[in-house]
Image (cartoon, rainbow, N blue to C red):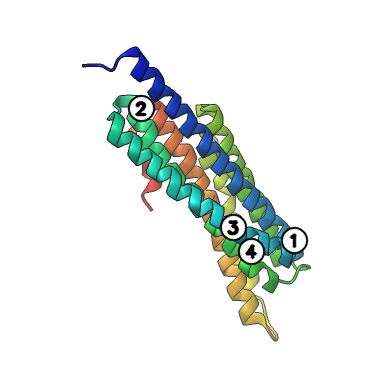
Amino acid sequence: MSPGPGIRAHFDAELDQLRLQVEVMAVRVGEALSRMRTVLATGNLKVAAQTLEADDEIDAMLVSLTERCYDLLRRQSPVASDLRFVVSVLRLLEELERVGDLALRVVKHAPELPGDSEMFDTLDQMADIAQGLYRTAVAAWASQSLDLASTLADRNQAMDGHYTRLLEQILRLEGPGAIQVAVSAVLIGKALDRIADHSVIVGERLQYMLTADPAYLASEVR
């Protein structure tokens, strides 16, 4: 038996509320990325501390919204597109939280880097790509845009060339402190690369949610 109109309307309202709460979490993660860019550029320890504090809020939102999804699944037993939406939100929450964690990793290691080197310029370019991809992914999700989501994978390919150049620059490091700088640069570079990857996954998951085509889930297998 299908649910009555009143029950359906209430469920739709709950889904809309969930969608808005996810977008709020996405904004918080976006703010973490902006602080990450600031710390990477300036080494500002005050902003770094703010990023650490904000990460606790992101973690709390992950737990709260995950519980909300499970509660909806338990109470409503959604089918078809509703089920894809709730399950996709569960995946999206994990991606958002992971992006926040990776931003925090960059913040923790950024003060170890010299700010006037080719290597720093490469990392700054990688951060620009990662932040741009994340913003596009969130915009695609908020607008439910297949067109925006479909641009992410191709744009992410630019990250590979930057990461290769970063490794070449790291190999040329020498002198006192070179090892510590090299380790920090590798960790930051990999974190930025993964932020871009997680942004692509958000886009792929959106395309799956809207089309039900399981081919879009392939990017999640890593």
Percent from the top left, x then y, of residue 41? Answer: 74, 61
Disc number at residue 41?
Answer: 1
Calculate the distance from the C-alpha at mark 1 to the C-alpha at mark 2.
43 Å
Instruction: State which tag comes first along the sequence, 4 or 2.
Output: 2
Disc number at residue 107?
Answer: 4
Under mark 2, the amino acid is Asp
Q: Which residue is mark 3?
A: 103
Q: Nearer the viewer, mark 1 or mark 2?
A: 2
Percent from the top left, x then y, of residue 35? Answer: 68, 55
Q: Callout 2: few (<14), some (14-19), or many (20+) C-alpha neighbours within 10 Å?
A: some
Q: Residues at badges 3 and 4 in contact (C-beta under 8 Å)?
A: yes
Residue at screen point 65% across, 54% down: 127
Q: Is residue 105 above or below residue 13?
A: below
Residue at screen point 33% across, 31% down: 83
Q: Secondary structure at mark 3?
A: helix
Calculate the distance from the C-alpha at mark 2 to the C-alpha at mark 3.
31 Å
Q: Nearer the viewer, mark 1 or mark 3?
A: 3
Q: Residues at badges 4 and 2 in contact (C-beta under 8 Å)?
A: no
Calculate the distance from the C-alpha at mark 1 to the C-alpha at mark 4.
10 Å
Q: Which residue is mark 2?
A: 82
Q: How many numbered discs, if any? A: 4
